[in-house]
Image (cartoon, rainbow, N blue to C red):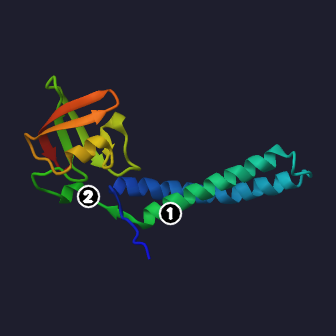
């Protein structure tokens, strides 16, 4: 039997997933009603409303399955309970780029990642390069635009 891999995430990411799951579950009866209504229109082979409703039903069921899987395997991590001098999941890291410009990232779960708000997935190339590093360590990351070099200047657990 295969072991289920835990999905690390912050509490807010878990709450967002469960809220998304609730919305999708509430959509189920509406889709069934749409299918029934479209079925009442007769010939299903050329019934666009029926096919659209069936397609949406498939999408919703797939999303529900995916979210239920993540929620059931969730390992909720609170960064405030962490400490140490090494970068781990949940840490907020301040880096200095080649021009000594500070950049701040928090290492989060895959469903929580949002680079624009400074949250990178633990599976991203940058996060993988950062995990285990300490203040004053230098890292090199290969990205599509080339190699980037950073200096770890600060590690926080907030």
Q: Secondary structure at mark 2?
A: loop
Q: Where does label 2 land, which residue? A: 78
* Depth check, front residue: 68 or 78: 68
Is the residue 92 above or below the residue 77 in the image? Answer: above
Q: Residue most toward the left?
A: 136
Question: Measured along the vertical axis of the image, is residue 145 above or below residue 141?
Answer: above
For residue 96, what is the image quadrant?
top left
Task: Identify the residue shown where x is 38% and y is 48%.
Answer: 112
Q: Secondary structure at mark 1?
A: helix
Q: In screen coordinates, is 35 left or right of 155?
A: right
Residue 25 rendering spot, x and y as whole percentages: 60, 60
| Residue under the image location 43 percent in, 72 percent down | 2
Sooner in the amino-acid sequence: mark 1 or mark 2: 1
**Residue positioned 81% across, 44% down in the render:** 48
Residue 71 falls in image quadrant:
bottom left
- The answer to whether mark 1 and mark 2 are in CB contact below 8 A is no
Q: How many marks?
A: 2
Residue 152, position as x, y percentages in the image: 13, 39
Against 5, residue 103 (above or below) is above
Compared to residue 57, the image places residue 137 above or below, namely: above
The disc placed on residue 68 is: 1
Quadrant that contains the N terminus? bottom left
Q: Nearer the viewer, mark 1 or mark 2?
A: 1
Q: Position of residue 53 (x, y in %)?
A: 74, 50
How far is mark 1 from mark 2, CA to CA? 21 Å
Q: Identify the disc placed on residue 25.
A: none
**How would you rate the neighbour count of disc 1 (Cα within 10 Å): few for under 14, some for 14-19, many for 20 or more?**
some
Q: Residue furthest bottom?
A: 1
For label 2, count other residues whose C-alpha is less than 10 Å away and answer few (under 14), some (14-19) or many (20+): some
Measured as percent of width and height from the top left, residue 82 is found at 17, 58
């Amino acid at each position: 039997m295969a072991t289920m891999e835990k999905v690390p995430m912050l509490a807010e990411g878990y709450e967002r997933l469960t809220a998304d799951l609730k919305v999708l579950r509430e959509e189920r009866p509406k889709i069934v009603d749409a299918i029934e209504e479209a079925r009442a229109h007769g010939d299903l082979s050329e019934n666009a409303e029926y096919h659209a409703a069936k397609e949406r039903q498939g999408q919703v069921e797939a999303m529900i399955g995916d979210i239920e899987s993540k929620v059931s395997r969730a390992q909720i991590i609170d960064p405030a309970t962490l400490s140490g001098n090494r970068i781990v999941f949940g840490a907020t890291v301040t880096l200095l780029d080649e021009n000594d410009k500070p950049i701040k990232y928090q290492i989060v779960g895959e469903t929580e990642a949002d680079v624009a708000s400074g949250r990178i997935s633990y599976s991203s190339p940058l996060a993988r390069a950062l995990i285990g590093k300490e203040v004053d360590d230098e890292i090199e990351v290969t990205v599509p635009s080339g190699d980037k070099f950073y200096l770890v200047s600060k590690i926080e657990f907030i």
